[in-house]
Amino acid sequence: MKRSKINSLIDEAISFIESLGFKMPPFAYWNPQQWQTKKATSQEIAHNMLGWDVTDFGSGDFDRRGLVVLTIRNGNPHDKERYPKPYAEKLLIAQEEQETPIHFHWSKMEDIINRGGGDLVVELWNSDEREERLDTPVHVSIDGTRHTVEAGEPIVLVPGQSITLLPLMYHRFYGKKGTGRVLLGEVSAVNDDNNDNRFYEDLPRFPLIEEDEEARYLLITEY
């Protein structure tokens, strides 16, 4: 991805989040120079990968397959003594028909919440011991109510609705066409993006960056 694209996507994300009345932590606005001056006092942010995360999952086509993420809080599964939080929270922005590809988490349970904007479409599959997708019905909780859906059946979440995704449950999601971009919340167990993502396709979690202009923000992989 080009740095210029990442810069503009974060600018747009900030405007979109603010337009919905969600208040972000100060580090969401820091530029690289501010990160340097605050380095000694912001080790929790750096070590636990709080901040901006923009990816196209190696697609080269962000509008078709991509995601903008702001991790607000997180623990650290590799240093629980210093960072004992057992939970994480993120904001995610999905555009219309922009896919977050099929994946599951070996350890993390999460709630995905439609915080505002358009509608979100979620598709689910069970997995087997070989980590293959199954065509069996999926049992899922949507806002505390039990549902059974067919494998891959589109589930539409309107603003305010949420869905609980269990470990080993394959899922993909995207903004519903014609409803606008979606602000999502994620509330979960501790998040470990380096080790706890199993993509059904062989995909990179983080992008390669082409430095065509100066960074206005640092990504979570750049501290």
Image (cartoon, helix red, strand yellow):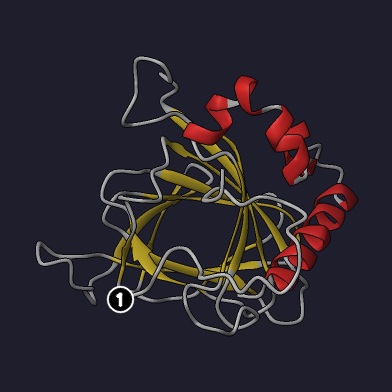
Q: Residues within 10 Å of mark 1 (few under 14, many from 20)?
A: few
Q: Nearer the viewer, residue 188 or 178?
A: 188
- For the point 87% across and 55% down, the residue is 15
Name the spot of residue 138 as percent of width and height, x first. Answer: 31, 63
Question: How many marks are shown on the rendered structure?
Answer: 1
Residue 97, picture quadrant: bottom right
Outermost residue to the left: 129
Residue 35, picture quadrant: top right
- Please give left or right for residue 202 compared with residue 213 in the image: left
- For the point 43% across and 20% down, the residue is 83
Q: Nearer the viewer, residue 151 or 171?
A: 171
Amino acid type of the residue that numbered disc 1 sits on in the rendered structure: Asp
- For the point 48% across and 34% down, the residue is 48
Name the spot of residue 147 as percent of width and height, x first. Answer: 41, 57
Name the spot of residue 211 as percent of width and height, x first. Answer: 65, 70
Residue at the disc numbered 1:
202
Outermost residue to the top: 81
**193 versus 121 height, above or below:** above
Q: Nearer the viewer, residue 152 or 96?
A: 96
Name the spot of residue 223 as percent of width and height, x first. Answer: 56, 42
- Please give left or right for residue 137 compared with residue 15 in the image: left
Quarter placement of the N terminus: bottom right
Secondary structure type for disc 1? loop
**161 versus 102 height, above or below:** above
- Please give left or right for residue 182 compared with residue 199 in the image: right
Q: Nearer the viewer, residue 55 or 3?
A: 3
